């Protein structure tokens, strides 16, 4: 029946493209989580009245984050071509999409991390300081656990955005469902391929959102 | 135990400088409960935060437990803080941790091994009366229970000093009393020095040995609680004493009496300790040809004994009233004539 409704869909290829999209999304989400968290924490701790209060570092980091956050992703990919080429020797394939995906998403996530950290009750940080906690203890045992629900819902939003980014990266040759939809579907006027790729992307997004919401609720003990 | 020398704290803000604490000299003894009372903005929080180095003084020195906190930094300051605990108005518990894990937090900071941590947490939970609640999250507790967790957490590393920043101000009167009793009990049992700040005289009279009154960053009055109650000097102290002696409410009745009895004298008697048990009033009536009207009476318990105020109208021939006054003086009862409200 499937084959009658979608005569042009090559299911093996579709599966391969799905795998590539998942691969790009998962790896880039993972790296974005770590990198964005680190940048977000740096932004937070260097802001006024915080433990590492430092105008220059804060301004510099904040500006970089804002600049990269403001560049449209498709432009960022093009701008990063030389960098990717230097790093990986090629601009084709799933690996080649990762630098652009991470550099595009990490500043966005860093912002969400900053917002999450600002929501932490100041008194709790002060209590930890009054107990003689080191800054590293405050980061690992106060800042991260106390903002966990917001950090998780933030990474869910970012992961969903990254699925979209992988599709865009696909158009310039990174592989995945976006690439399939564009090359096999759009350019060859096979609407059923485009439609199927879209449905699979939607399913991925729904699953990500569901998992994200579930874990977020689970960690929130407030 | 704690010595503040010539302490001033100036905050530099966009709108200029704010002097939060000014020229404070204060000495707190080991094992006592020392209260600092003042209205909001008086500089109490700034002052108590100087004691664990959360704030550094602009000038002067802070010494706690033989260590200069005002100049300590890094590891030295962090280690000192493990022996100077703090509890807060809004408890400041970690919502992401259970009661037991909140109490274990300072032990983790101090590097206590897991098995020992668990044992200590068990003891502390019993001490503050939270048995059975160890696996609850703070959001599942009442205000009083949260403060008990705060206290257990503060005691975890066997501190020498406990700082309380408005620790009962977010609690209802009954819970406030229960928490104050717990603090008193801890003070007696562990010999812990407690410094607490508050805007309620009730808290001071209930558990403090000595008190300092703060206004606009300065200590305007300090001394034994009973003494300050009996003989408040500064205007602000008199207002605070009125909070508990109830003389504020009696203003109206005094007014009425002044109108109804234009003769004689309205006298406020203040007595402390066992003097509250002397039958002075009946003695005055028996010995002199005077009439005594009771306008207002009140006895308050403090940790160092009862403290009472009695407002009476004494009427009669001037020389008889005079002699009645003399008798009061020989009894070391403080008598103050009120001729205006
Ligand atoms: N970090 C700060 N920066 C600037 N001003 C402050 C700061 N902390 C306190 N102040 C000011 O210092 C004064 C005393 O505040 P505080 O010690 O909190 O008083 P209290 O605890 O008695 O209400 C207030 O005028 C307050 O606005
Ligand atoms: Mg305060």
Image (cartoon, coloured by chain):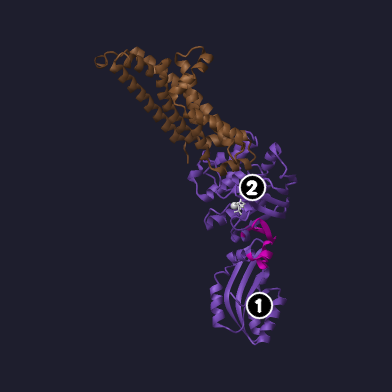
Which residue is disc 1 drawn over?
Answer: B280
Residue drawn where x is 67% and y is 55% of the image: B34
Residue B148 position within the rendered picture, expressed as x and y whole percent measured from the top left:
56, 48
Give residue A69's position: percent from left, percent from top: 48, 29
Chain B in the picture: what colour?
purple
Q: Taking B61 as reference, is B94 left or right?
A: left
Q: Is residue B167 magenta?
A: no
Write down the colour of chain A: brown
Residue B53 in the image, given as x and y percentages of width and height = 67, 44
Left or right, residue B51 beside residue A204: right
**Along the viewing direction, whichever of B324 and B274 lies nearer the viewer:** B324
Mark 1 residue CB less than 8 A from any atom of ligand 1: no
Residue A17, disc: none
| Relative height, residue B264 to residue A209 (above, below) | below
Name the front one of labels 1 and 2: 2
| First to last magenta residue range | B206-235
Q: Are marks 1 and 2 on the same chain?
A: yes
Q: Which quarter of the picture shows residue B298?
A: bottom right
Residue hosting label 2: B12
């Amino acid at each position: 029946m499937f084959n009658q409704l979608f005569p042009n869909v090559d299911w093996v290829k579709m599966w391969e493209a799905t795998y590539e999209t998942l691969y790009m999304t998962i790896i880039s989400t993972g790296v974005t989580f770590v990198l964005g968290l680190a940048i977000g924490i740096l932004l937070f701790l260097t802001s006024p009245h915080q433990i590492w209060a430092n105008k220059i570092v804060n301004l510099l980091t904040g500006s970089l984050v804002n600049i990269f956050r403001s560049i449209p992703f498709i432009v960022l990919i093009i701008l990063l071509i030389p960098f990717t080429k230097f790093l990986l020797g090629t601009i084709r394939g799933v690996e080649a999409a990762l630098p652009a995906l991470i550099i595009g998403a990490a500043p966005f996530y860093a912002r969400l991390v900053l917002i999450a950290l600002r929501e932490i009750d100041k008194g709790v940080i002060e209590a930890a300081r009054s107990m003689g906690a080191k800054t590293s203890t405050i980061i690992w045992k106060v800042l991260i656990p106390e903002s966990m629900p917001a950090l998780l819902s933030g990474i869910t939003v970012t992961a969903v955005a990254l699925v979209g980014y992988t599709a865009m990266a696909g158009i310039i040759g990174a592989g995945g469902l976006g690439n399939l939809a564009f090359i096999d579907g759009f350019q060859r006027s096979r609407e059923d391929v485009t439609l199927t790729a879209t449905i699979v992307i939607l399913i991925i997004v729904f699953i990500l959102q569901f998992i994200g919401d579930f874990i977020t609720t689970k960690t929130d003990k407030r | 135990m704690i010595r503040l020398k010539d302490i001033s704290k100036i905050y530099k803000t966009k709108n200029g400088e704010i002097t939060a604490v000014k020229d404070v000299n204060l000495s707190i003894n080991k094992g006592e409960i020392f209260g600092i009372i003042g209205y909001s903005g008086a500089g109490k929080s700034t002052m108590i935060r100087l004691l664990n180095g959360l704030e550094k003084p602009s000038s002067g020195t802070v010494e706690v437990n033989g260590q200069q906190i005002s100049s300590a930094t890094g590891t030295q300051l962090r280690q000192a803080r493990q022996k100077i605990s703090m509890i807060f108005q809004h408890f400041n518990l970690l919502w992401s941790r259970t009661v037991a894990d909140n109490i274990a937090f300072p032990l983790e900071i101090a590097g206590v091994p897991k098995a020992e941590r668990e044992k200590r947490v068990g003891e502390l939970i019993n001490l503050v009366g939270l048995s059975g609640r160890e696996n609850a999250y703070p959001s599942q507790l009442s205000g009083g229970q949260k403060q008990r967790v705060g206290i257990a957490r503060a005691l975890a590393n066997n501190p020498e000093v406990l700082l309380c920043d408005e620790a009962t101000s977010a609690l209802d009167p009954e819970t406030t009393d229960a928490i104050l009793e717990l603090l008193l009990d801890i003070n007696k049992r562990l010999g812990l020095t407690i410094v607490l700040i508050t805007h309620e005289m009730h808290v001071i009279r209930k558990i403090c040995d000595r008190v300092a009154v703060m206004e606009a960053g300065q200590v305007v009055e300090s001394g034994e609680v009973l003494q300050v109650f009996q003989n408040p000097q500064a205007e602000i102290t008199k207002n605070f004493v009125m909070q508990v002696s109830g003389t504020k409410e009696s203003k109206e009745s005094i007014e009425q009496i002044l109108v109804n009895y234009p003769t004689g004298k309205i006298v406020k008697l203040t007595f402390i300790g066992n003097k509250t048990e002397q039958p002075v009033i009946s003695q005055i009536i028996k010995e002199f040809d005077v009439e005594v009207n009771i306008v207002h009476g009140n006895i308050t318990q403090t940790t160092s004994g009862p403290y009472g105020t009695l407002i009476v109208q004494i009427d009669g021939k001037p020389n008889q009233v005079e002699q009645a006054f003399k008798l009061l003086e020989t009894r070391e009862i403080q008598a103050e004539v009120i001729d205006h409200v």
